[in-house]
């Protein structure tokens, strides 16, 4: 029998849609045992909503199916608490299945599960950690739907209006917020590690510890994003994982570190030397080869593409190197047994399940096809970018590359490609159909 935390009268059950937005129901505590055993029905079309929660009629999940239900089954045996809630409440993370019990593969969590299963069939286990950047904002920002400047009052009466990277003072002024974030992470089993002040004023990064369960790592990331927003509101703050909330300040990314273990627990990227094993090189080659067609996953929104500027710590072409933060795929300096890959492309606004599925899928294809990478870049990658094919730098270009991708269809699924493409095309129609303030200022 599942148990609620004492005094809680209700709980939230939710799934993540393709944009990483959480969709579900708030349910009385009396229904917990039934939900844990039988799940909750939601229309399958919910997975393919656009970013505003509207149906996407061209994705094949609405009228063609009669807007049929799927069943959302809890993925863990017990609910977890929501410490920041005004009234006591728990939450249950779920994953969607077809009504006959088979996986519903447009569900982003199901897509990642399938990729991990392909690794298991080869006797390999991905070990994954994520790093998520975000901005704290004045509380008024959420009401006004735009970030206020200066960004935030930090509790010491100062405005964080200048870059102060790795500043301890900035975190000291927000001690109450970060303490509550730590406590909420512990309550939900989220393995938060280091906290650092980042390049933008009011921008922070929290790193997760490595785990040998890639799906669990993505769960941690999706739940952490919800947690930060909830705790920020309790402190009269706003928060955002938007890729580029300020045109002239640092963007927010989601870096992914991963290695692979064999059935004996050995890191197969380790060859006892700094260059790493043949399998590491093959994985890097797959990542580089499929990076252009994966950009829609790594940068899913129009704003996402504002991060990718030369010299802005976000890669503009598929590149790799050792201990080099100007490339897309970095091999960090480490002890040999900890040899790993850092993927530096995705924005903090991306869906963690899809990001990990695209990264691990591309690496897997590189290994299976025994691909070879080009020579690693030494020094400033931005200084040699003319020699390389640029990554798609606009939303619609990334959509076209994604739609034409045989790799995406094979590894993440043709149904996913169809549904996600339709979602992005509808969002583009909506946004490009609106007239911006700058157009009025320039042309009226």
Image (cartoon, rainbow, N blue to C red):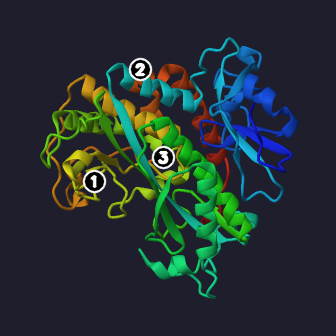
Q: Residue at x 67, y 51 (%)?
A: 434
Dot 3 or dot 2: first in sequence order is 3
Q: Is residue 257 above or below residue 34?
A: below
Q: How many angstroms separate mark 3 from mark 2 (CA)?
A: 21 Å
Q: Is residue 280 above or below residue 379?
A: above
The extreme bottom residue here reads: 157
Q: Is residue 65 left or right of residue 204?
A: right
Work out whether residue 380 or residue 282 is closer to the camera in this orientation and state it: 282
**SS at mark 3 in the image:** loop
How many other residues sit within 10 Å of disc 3, few (<14), some (14-19) or many (≥20)?
Answer: many
Look at the image and tell me whether residue 397 can be seen.
no
For marks 3 and 2, give the one nearer the viewer.
2
Q: Is residue 321 above or below residue 194?
A: above
| Residue bearing the label numbered 3 | 299
Mark 1 and 2 residues: CB-CB less than 8 Å, in contact? no
Q: Is residue 308 left or right of residue 233?
A: left
Q: How many marks?
A: 3
The quarter in which the C terminus is drawn is bottom right
Work out whether residue 358 or residue 393 is closer to the camera in this orientation and state it: 358
Dot 1 or dot 3: first in sequence order is 3
Checking the image for residue 327, the label placed there is 1
Q: How many angstroms separate mark 1 from mark 2 (CA)?
A: 27 Å
**SS at mark 2 in the image:** helix
Q: Residue at x 35, y 43 (%)?
A: 258
Q: Residue at x 20, y 29 (%)?
A: 371
Work out whether residue 152 or residue 407 is closer to the camera in this orientation and state it: 152
**SS at mark 1 in the image:** loop
How many other residues sit within 10 Å of disc 1, few (<14), some (14-19) or many (≥20)?
Answer: many
Dot 1 or dot 2: first in sequence order is 1
Checking the image for residue 316, the label placed there is none
| Residue bearing the label numbered 2 | 410
Q: Residue at x 31, y 50 (%)?
A: 328
């Amino acid at each position: 029998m599942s148990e609620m935390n004492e005094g809680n009268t209700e709980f939230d059950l939710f799934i993540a849609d393709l944009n990483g937005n959480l969709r579900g129901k708030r349910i009385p505590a009396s229904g917990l045992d039934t939900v844990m055993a039988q799940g909750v029905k939601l229309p399958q079309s919910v997975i393919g909503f656009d970013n505003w929660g509207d149906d996407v009629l061209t994705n094949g999940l609405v009228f063609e199916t009669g807007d049929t239900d799927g069943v959302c089954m809890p993925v863990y045996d017990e609910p977890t608490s929501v410490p920041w809630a005004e009234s006591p409440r728990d939450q249950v993370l779920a994953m969607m299945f077809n009504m006959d019990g088979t996986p519903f593969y447009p569900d982003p969590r199901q897509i990642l599960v399938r990729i991990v299963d392909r690794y298991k069939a080869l006797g390999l286990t991905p070990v994954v950690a994520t790093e998520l950047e975000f901005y704290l904002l004045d509380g008024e920002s959420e009401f006004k739907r735009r970030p206020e400047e200066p960004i935030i009052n930090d509790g010491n009466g100062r405005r964080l209006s200048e870059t102060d990277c790795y500043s301890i003072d900035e975190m000291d002024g927000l001690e109450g917020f970060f303490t509550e974030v730590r406590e909420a992470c512990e309550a939900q089993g989220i393995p938060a590690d280091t906290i650092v002040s980042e390049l933008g004023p009011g921008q922070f990064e929290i790193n997760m510890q490595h785990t040998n369960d890639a799906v669990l790592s993505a769960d941690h990331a999706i739940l952490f994003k919800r947690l930060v927003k909830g705790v920020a509101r309790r402190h009269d703050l706003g928060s955002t994982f938007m890729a580029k909330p300020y045109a002239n300040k640092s963007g927010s990314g989601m870096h992914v570190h991963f290695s692979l273990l064999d059935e004996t627990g050995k890191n197969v990227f380790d060859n006892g030397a700094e260059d790493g094993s043949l399998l590491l090189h093959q994985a890097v080659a797959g990542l580089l080869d499929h990076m252009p067609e994966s950009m829609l996953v790594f940068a899913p929104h129009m704003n996402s593409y504002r991060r990718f500027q030369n010299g802005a710590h976000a890669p503009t072409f598929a590149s790799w190197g050792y201990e080099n933060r100007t490339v897309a795929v970095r091999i960090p300096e480490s002890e040999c047994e900890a040899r790993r890959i850092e993927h530096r492309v995705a924005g903090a606004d991306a869906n963690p399940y899809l990001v990990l599925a695209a990264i691990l899928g591309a690496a897997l294809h590189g290994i299976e096809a025994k691909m070879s990478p080009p020579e690693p870049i030494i020094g400033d990658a931005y200084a040699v970018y003319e020699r390389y094919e640029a990554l798609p730098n606009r939303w619609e270009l990334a959509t076209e590359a994604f739609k034409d991708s045989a790799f995406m269809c094979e590894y993440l699924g043709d149904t996913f490609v169809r549904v996600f493409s339709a979602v992005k095309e509808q969002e583009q129609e909506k946004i490009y159909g609106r007239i911006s303030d700058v157009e009025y200022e320039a042309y009226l």
